[in-house]
Image: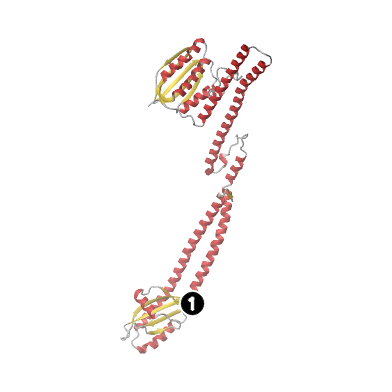
Amino acid sequence: MRLGGKTSITRRLTLLFVTASSVVLLALGFVIASTVEKHFEALDMEALTDKMELLRNALVLLKSQDDLKPLAQQLDHSLAGHHGLEVMVIDKNKTVLFATSNAHFDPGLMLASATQRPQQPILWTLGQQTYRAIAAELPSGSSARSSVIVAVATDIAHHQTYMSSFLHTLWLFVAGAAALTGLLGWAAARRGLAPLRAMREQTHAVTAQQLSQRLPVESVPVELAELAQSLNEMLARLEEAFRRLSDFSSDIAHELRTPVTNLMTQTQVALSRTRSAEEYHSILESNAEEFERMARMISDMLLLAKAENDLVVPTREKVNLADEVRVLFDYYEAVAEEKGLHLTAEGHGEVTADRLMLRRALGNLLSNAVRHSTVGSTIRVNISSNQGMISIGMENTGDTIPAEYLDRVFDRFFRVDPSRQRNSQGTGLGLAITKSIVLAHGGRITVASSEAVTAFTVTLPRAA
Protein backbone atom coordinates (compact mmCIF):
# COMPACT_ATOMS: atom_id res chain seq x y z
CA MET A 1 0.00 0.00 0.00
CA ARG A 2 1.48 3.32 -1.11
CA LEU A 3 0.29 6.82 -0.40
CA GLY A 4 1.97 9.59 -2.36
CA GLY A 5 4.87 7.31 -3.36
CA LYS A 6 5.69 6.37 0.25
CA THR A 7 5.71 2.84 1.63
CA SER A 8 3.04 2.18 4.23
CA ILE A 9 3.93 1.24 7.80
CA THR A 10 2.22 -2.13 7.32
CA ARG A 11 4.45 -2.97 4.36
CA ARG A 12 7.56 -1.82 6.19
CA LEU A 13 6.75 -3.95 9.24
CA THR A 14 5.96 -6.95 7.02
CA LEU A 15 9.28 -6.64 5.19
CA LEU A 16 11.04 -6.26 8.54
CA PHE A 17 9.43 -9.46 9.86
CA VAL A 18 10.34 -11.39 6.68
CA THR A 19 13.93 -10.14 6.67
CA ALA A 20 14.47 -10.80 10.37
CA SER A 21 13.01 -14.31 10.25
CA SER A 22 14.97 -15.21 7.09
CA VAL A 23 18.24 -14.04 8.62
CA VAL A 24 17.58 -15.98 11.82
CA LEU A 25 16.64 -19.17 9.95
CA LEU A 26 19.64 -18.92 7.63
CA ALA A 27 21.97 -18.39 10.57
CA LEU A 28 20.42 -21.36 12.34
CA GLY A 29 20.74 -23.49 9.18
CA PHE A 30 24.38 -22.47 8.83
CA VAL A 31 25.11 -23.50 12.42
CA ILE A 32 23.34 -26.84 11.96
CA ALA A 33 25.11 -27.52 8.64
CA SER A 34 28.48 -26.70 10.17
CA THR A 35 27.75 -28.96 13.15
CA VAL A 36 26.71 -31.87 10.91
CA GLU A 37 29.76 -31.41 8.69
CA LYS A 38 32.06 -31.44 11.73
CA HIS A 39 30.28 -34.55 13.00
CA PHE A 40 30.90 -36.33 9.70
CA GLU A 41 34.52 -35.22 9.77
CA ALA A 42 34.93 -36.54 13.31
CA LEU A 43 33.48 -39.93 12.32
CA ASP A 44 35.75 -40.14 9.28
CA MET A 45 38.80 -39.11 11.29
CA GLU A 46 38.06 -41.78 13.89
CA ALA A 47 37.98 -44.47 11.20
CA LEU A 48 41.05 -43.12 9.40
CA THR A 49 43.05 -42.84 12.62
CA ASP A 50 42.21 -46.43 13.57
CA LYS A 51 43.42 -47.70 10.17
CA MET A 52 46.56 -45.58 10.41
CA GLU A 53 47.38 -47.20 13.76
CA LEU A 54 46.72 -50.62 12.23
CA LEU A 55 49.15 -49.83 9.44
CA ARG A 56 51.70 -48.49 11.93
CA ASN A 57 51.65 -51.82 13.81
CA ALA A 58 51.75 -53.83 10.60
CA LEU A 59 54.66 -51.90 9.12
CA VAL A 60 56.81 -52.56 12.18
CA LEU A 61 56.65 -56.26 11.28
CA LEU A 62 57.91 -55.55 7.75
CA LYS A 63 61.50 -56.93 7.77
CA SER A 64 62.23 -57.54 4.09
CA GLN A 65 60.82 -57.34 0.62
CA ASP A 66 59.41 -60.82 1.01
CA ASP A 67 57.13 -59.60 3.82
CA LEU A 68 55.26 -57.28 1.45
CA LYS A 69 52.98 -60.00 0.07
CA PRO A 70 51.74 -61.24 3.46
CA LEU A 71 51.42 -57.61 4.55
CA ALA A 72 49.23 -56.84 1.54
CA GLN A 73 47.05 -59.85 2.31
CA GLN A 74 46.77 -58.78 5.93
CA LEU A 75 45.77 -55.23 4.93
CA ASP A 76 43.21 -56.52 2.43
CA HIS A 77 41.73 -58.70 5.14
CA SER A 78 41.60 -55.84 7.69
CA LEU A 79 39.95 -53.48 5.18
CA ALA A 80 37.28 -55.95 4.18
CA GLY A 81 33.80 -54.58 4.85
CA HIS A 82 34.99 -50.95 4.92
CA HIS A 83 33.28 -49.65 1.79
CA GLY A 84 34.96 -46.60 0.31
CA LEU A 85 38.09 -46.88 2.44
CA GLU A 86 41.33 -46.73 0.42
CA VAL A 87 44.98 -47.20 1.50
CA MET A 88 48.20 -46.47 -0.33
CA VAL A 89 51.79 -47.05 0.86
CA ILE A 90 54.84 -45.64 -0.93
CA ASP A 91 58.49 -45.27 -0.09
CA LYS A 92 60.40 -42.02 -0.20
CA ASN A 93 61.25 -42.66 -3.86
CA LYS A 94 57.49 -42.57 -4.57
CA THR A 95 57.43 -46.25 -5.39
CA VAL A 96 54.05 -47.77 -4.62
CA LEU A 97 54.48 -50.61 -2.14
CA PHE A 98 50.78 -51.26 -1.56
CA ALA A 99 47.52 -49.77 -2.81
CA THR A 100 43.88 -50.77 -2.73
CA SER A 101 41.93 -51.07 -5.97
CA ASN A 102 40.77 -47.41 -6.14
CA ALA A 103 43.71 -45.76 -4.42
CA HIS A 104 45.18 -43.87 -7.36
CA PHE A 105 46.51 -40.98 -5.29
CA ASP A 106 49.32 -38.74 -6.48
CA PRO A 107 52.51 -39.91 -4.74
CA GLY A 108 53.89 -36.37 -4.80
CA LEU A 109 50.77 -35.07 -3.06
CA MET A 110 51.01 -37.84 -0.49
CA LEU A 111 54.63 -37.02 0.26
CA ALA A 112 53.87 -33.29 0.62
CA SER A 113 50.88 -33.91 2.89
CA ALA A 114 52.82 -36.35 5.09
CA THR A 115 55.68 -33.91 5.65
CA GLN A 116 53.70 -30.63 5.87
CA ARG A 117 50.40 -31.72 7.50
CA PRO A 118 50.95 -35.16 9.07
CA GLN A 119 47.67 -36.87 10.04
CA GLN A 120 45.67 -33.69 9.35
CA PRO A 121 42.43 -34.12 7.35
CA ILE A 122 42.66 -33.14 3.69
CA LEU A 123 40.30 -33.46 0.73
CA TRP A 124 41.45 -35.24 -2.42
CA THR A 125 39.46 -35.45 -5.63
CA LEU A 126 39.84 -38.43 -7.97
CA GLY A 127 37.67 -38.03 -11.04
CA GLN A 128 34.06 -37.61 -9.80
CA GLN A 129 34.82 -38.83 -6.29
CA THR A 130 36.00 -36.84 -3.27
CA TYR A 131 37.96 -38.40 -0.43
CA ARG A 132 38.82 -37.25 3.07
CA ALA A 133 42.32 -38.49 3.78
CA ILE A 134 45.26 -38.36 6.17
CA ALA A 135 48.88 -39.04 5.32
CA ALA A 136 51.85 -39.73 7.58
CA GLU A 137 55.39 -40.99 7.54
CA LEU A 138 55.51 -44.28 9.49
CA PRO A 139 58.54 -46.26 10.60
CA SER A 140 59.23 -49.56 8.87
CA GLY A 141 60.86 -52.69 10.30
CA SER A 142 62.78 -53.23 7.03
CA SER A 143 66.46 -52.37 7.06
CA ALA A 144 66.17 -51.21 3.45
CA ARG A 145 63.41 -48.72 4.26
CA SER A 146 63.56 -46.93 7.61
CA SER A 147 60.18 -45.28 6.95
CA VAL A 148 57.38 -45.26 4.39
CA ILE A 149 54.60 -42.80 3.40
CA VAL A 150 51.09 -44.02 4.18
CA ALA A 151 47.80 -42.42 3.06
CA VAL A 152 44.41 -43.55 4.30
CA ALA A 153 41.31 -42.08 2.63
CA THR A 154 37.56 -42.60 2.74
CA ASP A 155 34.93 -41.73 0.13
CA ILE A 156 32.62 -38.93 1.38
CA ALA A 157 30.13 -39.03 -1.48
CA HIS A 158 27.32 -40.13 0.82
CA HIS A 159 28.13 -37.23 3.17
CA GLN A 160 28.00 -34.75 0.30
CA THR A 161 24.69 -36.20 -0.91
CA TYR A 162 23.22 -35.81 2.57
CA MET A 163 24.48 -32.19 2.91
CA SER A 164 23.13 -31.28 -0.53
CA SER A 165 19.72 -32.66 0.39
CA PHE A 166 19.88 -30.89 3.74
CA LEU A 167 20.70 -27.51 2.18
CA HIS A 168 17.95 -27.95 -0.42
CA THR A 169 15.44 -28.68 2.34
CA LEU A 170 16.77 -25.74 4.34
CA TRP A 171 16.24 -23.32 1.45
CA LEU A 172 12.72 -24.58 0.90
CA PHE A 173 11.98 -24.27 4.61
CA VAL A 174 13.40 -20.72 4.76
CA ALA A 175 11.34 -19.70 1.74
CA GLY A 176 8.17 -21.19 3.23
CA ALA A 177 8.90 -19.71 6.65
CA ALA A 178 9.55 -16.29 5.10
CA ALA A 179 6.24 -16.42 3.27
CA LEU A 180 4.39 -17.56 6.39
CA THR A 181 6.16 -14.95 8.52
CA GLY A 182 5.28 -12.29 5.97
CA LEU A 183 1.63 -13.29 6.12
CA LEU A 184 1.60 -13.41 9.91
CA GLY A 185 3.58 -10.18 10.10
CA TRP A 186 1.13 -8.45 7.80
CA ALA A 187 -1.77 -9.65 9.93
CA ALA A 188 0.01 -8.59 13.14
CA ALA A 189 0.88 -5.17 11.68
CA ARG A 190 -2.69 -4.65 10.49
CA ARG A 191 -4.01 -5.57 13.91
CA GLY A 192 -1.37 -3.50 15.71
CA LEU A 193 -2.10 -0.44 13.57
CA ALA A 194 -5.87 -0.73 14.00
CA PRO A 195 -5.86 2.06 16.64
CA LEU A 196 -4.21 4.36 14.10
CA ARG A 197 -6.92 3.61 11.55
CA ALA A 198 -9.54 4.22 14.23
CA MET A 199 -7.91 7.57 15.02
CA ARG A 200 -7.94 8.42 11.32
CA GLU A 201 -11.65 7.63 11.06
CA GLN A 202 -12.36 9.69 14.15
CA THR A 203 -10.43 12.66 12.78
CA HIS A 204 -12.55 12.51 9.61
CA ALA A 205 -15.49 13.54 11.78
CA VAL A 206 -13.68 16.73 12.78
CA THR A 207 -14.87 19.69 10.73
CA ALA A 208 -15.04 23.43 11.21
CA GLN A 209 -18.56 22.91 12.57
CA GLN A 210 -17.59 19.96 14.81
CA LEU A 211 -14.32 20.91 16.44
CA SER A 212 -15.58 19.61 19.78
CA GLN A 213 -14.70 16.04 18.72
CA ARG A 214 -11.89 14.48 20.78
CA LEU A 215 -9.89 11.26 20.47
CA PRO A 216 -10.35 8.74 23.32
CA VAL A 217 -6.93 8.72 24.99
CA GLU A 218 -7.85 5.92 27.41
CA SER A 219 -8.77 3.40 24.68
CA VAL A 220 -5.59 3.69 22.58
CA PRO A 221 -2.28 1.89 23.25
CA VAL A 222 0.31 3.57 25.44
CA GLU A 223 2.53 4.29 22.40
CA LEU A 224 -0.28 6.30 20.78
CA ALA A 225 -1.62 7.97 23.91
CA GLU A 226 0.78 10.92 23.63
CA LEU A 227 -0.10 11.35 19.96
CA ALA A 228 -3.82 11.28 20.77
CA GLN A 229 -3.29 13.78 23.58
CA SER A 230 -1.33 16.09 21.27
CA LEU A 231 -4.07 15.87 18.65
CA ASN A 232 -6.70 16.65 21.28
CA GLU A 233 -4.72 19.67 22.43
CA MET A 234 -4.39 20.80 18.81
CA LEU A 235 -8.15 20.39 18.32
CA ALA A 236 -8.76 22.39 21.49
CA ARG A 237 -6.55 25.18 20.17
CA LEU A 238 -8.30 25.07 16.81
CA GLU A 239 -11.71 25.12 18.48
CA GLU A 240 -10.70 28.12 20.55
CA ALA A 241 -9.23 29.86 17.49
CA PHE A 242 -12.39 29.22 15.45
CA ARG A 243 -14.55 30.41 18.32
CA ARG A 244 -12.55 33.60 18.64
CA LEU A 245 -12.59 34.05 14.88
CA SER A 246 -16.35 33.58 14.81
CA ASP A 247 -16.79 35.99 17.71
CA PHE A 248 -14.47 38.46 16.05
CA SER A 249 -16.38 38.27 12.76
CA SER A 250 -19.64 38.78 14.61
CA ASP A 251 -18.22 41.62 16.69
CA ILE A 252 -16.66 43.45 13.77
CA ALA A 253 -19.85 43.10 11.76
CA HIS A 254 -21.76 44.58 14.69
CA GLU A 255 -19.23 47.37 15.27
CA LEU A 256 -19.05 48.38 11.61
CA ARG A 257 -22.78 48.08 11.04
CA THR A 258 -23.57 50.95 13.43
CA PRO A 259 -21.37 53.62 11.79
CA VAL A 260 -22.30 52.42 8.30
CA THR A 261 -26.01 52.58 9.21
CA ASN A 262 -25.54 56.06 10.63
CA LEU A 263 -23.74 57.21 7.50
CA MET A 264 -26.42 55.77 5.23
CA THR A 265 -29.25 57.28 7.29
CA GLN A 266 -27.68 60.72 7.49
CA THR A 267 -26.87 60.68 3.79
CA GLN A 268 -30.39 59.61 2.81
CA VAL A 269 -31.91 62.28 5.06
CA ALA A 270 -29.59 64.89 3.62
CA LEU A 271 -30.60 63.92 0.09
CA SER A 272 -34.30 63.86 0.87
CA ARG A 273 -34.61 67.61 0.28
CA THR A 274 -32.57 70.65 -0.56
CA ARG A 275 -30.60 72.00 2.42
CA SER A 276 -28.49 75.04 3.21
CA ALA A 277 -24.71 75.05 3.15
CA GLU A 278 -24.59 75.12 6.96
CA GLU A 279 -26.79 72.02 7.16
CA TYR A 280 -24.64 70.14 4.66
CA HIS A 281 -21.54 71.22 6.58
CA SER A 282 -23.02 69.84 9.81
CA ILE A 283 -23.91 66.53 8.14
CA LEU A 284 -20.42 66.18 6.67
CA GLU A 285 -18.83 66.85 10.08
CA SER A 286 -20.95 64.09 11.60
CA ASN A 287 -20.00 61.74 8.74
CA ALA A 288 -16.33 62.61 9.23
CA GLU A 289 -16.53 61.53 12.86
CA GLU A 290 -17.93 58.16 11.84
CA PHE A 291 -15.22 57.75 9.20
CA GLU A 292 -12.53 58.56 11.77
CA ARG A 293 -13.99 55.96 14.13
CA MET A 294 -13.98 53.33 11.38
CA ALA A 295 -10.43 54.27 10.39
CA ARG A 296 -9.23 53.86 14.00
CA MET A 297 -10.98 50.54 14.26
CA ILE A 298 -9.38 49.23 11.04
CA SER A 299 -5.95 50.48 12.14
CA ASP A 300 -6.32 48.79 15.51
CA MET A 301 -7.42 45.55 13.90
CA LEU A 302 -4.36 45.56 11.64
CA LEU A 303 -2.12 46.12 14.65
CA LEU A 304 -3.70 43.19 16.47
CA ALA A 305 -3.37 40.96 13.40
CA LYS A 306 0.36 41.77 13.22
CA ALA A 307 0.80 41.14 16.93
CA GLU A 308 -0.87 37.72 16.73
CA ASN A 309 1.51 36.72 13.90
CA ASP A 310 4.64 37.91 15.75
CA LEU A 311 5.09 40.81 13.35
CA VAL A 312 5.34 43.43 16.11
CA VAL A 313 9.08 43.92 16.67
CA PRO A 314 9.46 46.98 18.91
CA THR A 315 12.36 49.35 18.46
CA ARG A 316 13.92 49.15 21.90
CA GLU A 317 15.26 52.07 23.91
CA LYS A 318 15.52 52.94 27.58
CA VAL A 319 12.23 54.45 28.76
CA ASN A 320 11.65 56.26 32.06
CA LEU A 321 8.18 55.19 33.17
CA ALA A 322 7.63 58.11 35.53
CA ASP A 323 8.25 60.56 32.67
CA GLU A 324 5.86 58.69 30.39
CA VAL A 325 3.11 58.71 33.03
CA ARG A 326 3.52 62.50 33.52
CA VAL A 327 3.21 63.02 29.74
CA LEU A 328 -0.04 61.00 29.74
CA PHE A 329 -1.34 62.92 32.76
CA ASP A 330 -0.79 66.18 30.87
CA TYR A 331 -2.68 64.80 27.88
CA TYR A 332 -5.69 63.58 29.90
CA GLU A 333 -5.68 66.42 32.42
CA ALA A 334 -8.48 68.36 30.70
CA VAL A 335 -10.75 65.31 30.45
CA ALA A 336 -10.05 64.39 34.08
CA GLU A 337 -10.91 67.89 35.27
CA GLU A 338 -14.27 67.72 33.52
CA LYS A 339 -15.16 64.67 35.66
CA GLY A 340 -13.47 66.02 38.78
CA LEU A 341 -10.88 63.21 38.76
CA HIS A 342 -7.51 63.39 40.52
CA LEU A 343 -4.44 61.81 38.86
CA THR A 344 -1.59 60.70 41.15
CA ALA A 345 1.63 58.82 40.42
CA GLU A 346 4.24 57.24 42.70
CA GLY A 347 7.52 55.45 42.17
CA HIS A 348 9.91 55.29 39.25
CA GLY A 349 11.63 52.75 37.04
CA GLU A 350 13.19 52.19 33.64
CA VAL A 351 12.46 49.57 31.02
CA THR A 352 13.80 48.81 27.55
CA ALA A 353 10.87 49.25 25.19
CA ASP A 354 9.44 50.94 22.11
CA ARG A 355 8.52 54.33 23.56
CA LEU A 356 5.53 55.06 21.31
CA MET A 357 4.02 51.59 21.66
CA LEU A 358 4.46 51.58 25.43
CA ARG A 359 2.94 55.06 25.63
CA ARG A 360 -0.04 53.81 23.63
CA ALA A 361 -0.52 50.81 25.95
CA LEU A 362 -0.39 52.94 29.11
CA GLY A 363 -2.57 55.55 27.41
CA ASN A 364 -5.23 52.94 26.69
CA LEU A 365 -5.26 51.92 30.35
CA LEU A 366 -5.46 55.53 31.53
CA SER A 367 -8.20 56.33 29.00
CA ASN A 368 -10.14 53.28 30.19
CA ALA A 369 -9.71 54.37 33.82
CA VAL A 370 -10.87 57.94 33.08
CA ARG A 371 -13.90 56.69 31.17
CA HIS A 372 -15.08 54.30 33.90
CA SER A 373 -14.09 56.19 37.07
CA THR A 374 -16.67 57.63 39.42
CA VAL A 375 -16.93 61.41 39.37
CA GLY A 376 -14.65 63.00 41.95
CA SER A 377 -12.56 59.83 42.51
CA THR A 378 -8.79 59.37 42.21
CA ILE A 379 -6.81 57.44 39.59
CA ARG A 380 -3.57 56.12 41.11
CA VAL A 381 -0.51 54.95 39.18
CA ASN A 382 2.18 53.12 41.14
CA ILE A 383 5.57 52.08 39.72
CA SER A 384 7.60 49.51 41.65
CA SER A 385 10.40 47.03 41.02
CA ASN A 386 10.90 43.48 42.21
CA GLN A 387 13.40 40.76 41.17
CA GLY A 388 14.42 42.33 37.89
CA MET A 389 10.87 43.27 36.87
CA ILE A 390 9.07 46.62 36.82
CA SER A 391 5.37 46.73 37.70
CA ILE A 392 3.05 49.57 36.67
CA GLY A 393 -0.22 49.45 38.58
CA MET A 394 -3.19 51.63 37.54
CA GLU A 395 -6.12 51.76 39.94
CA ASN A 396 -9.45 53.54 39.63
CA THR A 397 -12.78 53.61 41.49
CA GLY A 398 -15.90 52.72 39.54
CA ASP A 399 -18.18 49.84 38.74
CA THR A 400 -16.86 46.45 39.83
CA ILE A 401 -16.12 44.03 37.01
CA PRO A 402 -17.81 40.65 37.74
CA ALA A 403 -15.34 37.84 38.38
CA GLU A 404 -16.62 35.80 35.41
CA TYR A 405 -15.68 38.64 33.04
CA LEU A 406 -12.15 39.32 34.29
CA ASP A 407 -10.59 36.77 31.89
CA ARG A 408 -12.37 38.35 28.91
CA VAL A 409 -11.73 42.06 29.38
CA PHE A 410 -8.75 41.79 27.00
CA ASP A 411 -10.83 40.18 24.22
CA ARG A 412 -11.61 42.21 21.12
CA PHE A 413 -14.84 44.21 21.30
CA PHE A 414 -15.70 42.69 24.66
CA ARG A 415 -17.83 44.85 26.94
CA VAL A 416 -18.99 44.01 30.42
CA ASP A 417 -22.34 45.60 29.59
CA PRO A 418 -24.36 42.75 28.00
CA SER A 419 -26.48 45.24 26.11
CA ARG A 420 -23.37 45.99 23.98
CA GLN A 421 -24.29 49.64 23.75
CA ARG A 422 -22.02 51.51 21.43
CA ASN A 423 -19.59 53.86 23.11
CA SER A 424 -18.53 56.61 20.77
CA GLN A 425 -15.37 57.23 22.75
CA GLY A 426 -13.71 53.93 21.86
CA THR A 427 -13.55 51.05 19.42
CA GLY A 428 -13.57 48.23 21.99
CA LEU A 429 -10.02 47.22 21.02
CA GLY A 430 -7.97 49.28 23.48
CA LEU A 431 -7.33 46.60 26.11
CA ALA A 432 -6.68 43.95 23.45
CA ILE A 433 -4.06 46.23 21.88
CA THR A 434 -2.55 46.93 25.30
CA LYS A 435 -2.16 43.22 26.01
CA SER A 436 -0.55 42.62 22.58
CA ILE A 437 1.97 45.41 23.16
CA VAL A 438 2.84 44.14 26.64
CA LEU A 439 3.31 40.56 25.38
CA ALA A 440 5.46 41.82 22.49
CA HIS A 441 7.80 43.34 25.10
CA GLY A 442 8.06 40.07 27.01
CA GLY A 443 5.77 41.21 29.84
CA ARG A 444 2.35 40.33 31.21
CA ILE A 445 -0.79 42.18 32.23
CA THR A 446 -3.40 41.27 34.85
CA VAL A 447 -6.61 42.78 36.17
CA ALA A 448 -8.38 42.60 39.51
CA SER A 449 -11.69 44.17 40.54
CA SER A 450 -13.48 44.15 43.86
CA GLU A 451 -15.49 46.57 46.02
CA ALA A 452 -15.74 49.17 43.23
CA VAL A 453 -11.94 49.28 42.77
CA THR A 454 -10.42 48.01 39.51
CA ALA A 455 -6.66 47.65 39.15
CA PHE A 456 -4.64 46.80 36.04
CA THR A 457 -1.01 45.69 36.56
CA VAL A 458 1.58 45.66 33.76
CA THR A 459 4.86 43.82 34.48
CA LEU A 460 7.87 44.39 32.21
CA PRO A 461 11.56 43.38 32.38
CA ARG A 462 13.71 46.04 34.01
CA ALA A 463 16.17 47.87 31.77
CA ALA A 464 19.71 46.47 31.95
Is residue 368 or residue 426 the one in the foreground? 426
Is residue 70 or residue 208 the one in the foreground? 208
Relative vertical location of residue 153 with respect to residue 193 in this rendering, above or below: below
Q: Check the picture and name the quadrant holding the C terminus.
A: top left
Is residue 448 or residue 145 the one in the foreground? 448
Rendering coords of residue 458 (x, y %)? 46, 23
Rendering coords of residue 157 (x, y %)? 49, 75
What residue is rendered at 39% in x and 88% in y? 69
Judge left or right: residue 392 versus residue 180. Answer: left
Instruction: Identify the image quadrant of residue 353.
Output: top left
Whether residue 154 is visible, yes or no, is: yes
What residue is rendered at 57% in x and 58% in y? 180
Q: Which residue is mark 1?
A: 128
Judge left or right: residue 196 versus residue 140. Answer: right
Residue at the farthest bottom position: 66
Rendering coords of residue 426 (x, y %)? 55, 19
Whether residue 451 is visible, yes or no, is: no
**Amino acid type, mark 1:** Gln
